[in-house]
Every structure is written in structure tokens, then in C-alpha cells.
Image: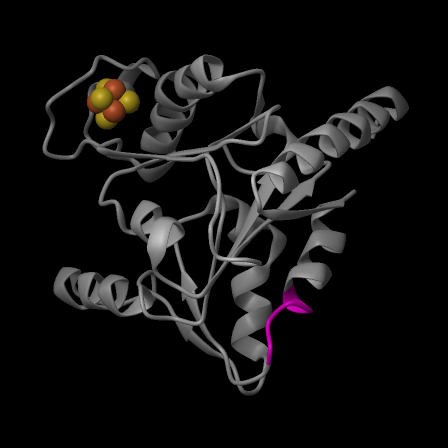
Amino acid sequence: MDKNQALWNQRVAQTIMENLEKRHMTASYAESGTQALEEVLAMIPKGSTVYRCGSLTTTTIGVWKRLSEMAGIQVIDPYRHGLSHEESLELRHKGLGADIMISSCNAVTLDGRLVSLDGLGNRAAAMMFGPRKVILVVGMNKVSDDLDSALSRVKNYAAPVNAIRLGVETPCGRDGICHDCRSSQRICNMWSIIEGNKIPGRIHVKLVGETLGY
Ligand code: SF4
């Protein structure tokens, strides 16, 4: 990676981590997805149930592959191949009672707010009050200056590019631009903005000095 970009990542991550901690969340920084993977896995006690929420970031760094190989870990995975829609929904309900969820958010602000936008809302619901521990892996490409720019990033970039990734039949899936549609396939229905945390140690944000996810 470019040396200056690496230094920017480290320095900006430091500011965000301090601001997350002021909001009673915990945070750490990994220079690479590889490092982040090992540090996240080290946070999962044997015997845990782990809820998989939709996240290209965690899939990209290999979280689900590695967890599936670890003895004594039960992954609640609504994305398992071959599940019916009803079975997948049932697992999304079950995941809310897991010990740990691992996912990402769609933007993090310099002052430590976490912004996400879901189609179904299961990730947003789980982040807010579900699993006893929440681990969010967030690439530094998701840093936004403030809440307004985070909301814009998520709605006008993350949602359309995810629509393209998922091949959904929405206007943004065709041209990459949000048209504030009313499609039944709409992937951006439920917002979550996390401004703080009241359960000590519940939310941990792992910032990563790489471009990960959207
Ligand atoms: S409102 Fe519709 S067009 Fe806009 S990002 Fe969401 S799914 Fe795409």
C-alpha cells in the first residue's frame, strides 16, 4: 500500500477509535484484513454461537470459512446454500439470540457514529439489541466526515453498488444511481445509526486499513 495512504489510515483510525470509546464502545485497528481476521477469531470463545449477518467485508477476509473449521463454534448462517426463504428468515430470527454477531456497517463517521442501511433489518436489529456481543469489521474506505456525508455515502453509493452486486431488479441495480424507488426488491429499507452503547463491552469496532466491502 502507498505509504501516505497507510499513514492516513492509521492516524484517522486513531481519532475514530478515541471517539468510539467516548461513546462507550471498544475499538481496535488492524493494518490488513489478514491481521483483522486473526484478531477477530481470537475474540470468539469456544462454545459460542455466532450469527452471520450480511457483510461482504467479513466474507472477503475469510471469517466464515475459518469459523466453519473451528471446533466448538456454532455458526447461525442464513446464507447457507440450499436454504428456502422461510428457513433463511427463521435463522435470521434465531441469530438475534446468539452469543456473538459479526458483521460490518456501511459507514463510520470521524466522531464515531456507525451507520447502516438494511433491506430486511435483521443486521440493524441485531446490532442494536440482540446478540450479547457485536463485532463490526470496517474498512477505512467507509470513513465519512460526518453524519450527513455518511447517510449520503450509504444511500447513494453503498446501496446501489450492493444492488449491482446482488443482481436485484431495482433502478439502482440498472444504472448505479438511487431513484428512491418503491420496488419490492428495495435493498435499503431500515436505517440504523448507533451513537453510543450502554452495555459495557458489547460493541467492538475493528477498523481495517484496507478497502473492504462497500
Ligand atoms: S431506494 Fe431503490 S433505487 Fe434507491 S438505493 Fe434503494 S433500492 Fe436502489
Q: Position of residue 119 (x, y in %)?
A: 24, 39
Q: Give left or right: position of 124 versus 212.
A: left
Q: Give left or right: position of 137 versus 192.
A: right
Q: Position of residue 90 (x, y in %)?
A: 19, 67
Q: Quadrant of residue 91?
A: bottom left
Indicate the quadrant of ligand 1 in the picture. Answer: top left
Q: Position of residue 139 (x, y in %)?
A: 62, 37
Is 207 above or below relative to 74? above
Predominant SS of the magenta segment: loop
Q: Quadrant of the N terminus?
A: top right
The chosen color scheme is one colour
Q: Quadrant of residue 16?
A: top right
Which residue appears at 32% of the width and 31% of the height? 163
Q: Position of residue 176 (x, y in %)?
A: 35, 17
Q: Quadrant of residue 29?
A: top right
Q: Is 80 or 156 nearer to us in this picture?
A: 156
Which residue appears at 51% of the width and 31% of the height? 113
Give the extent of the magenta segment: 41-45
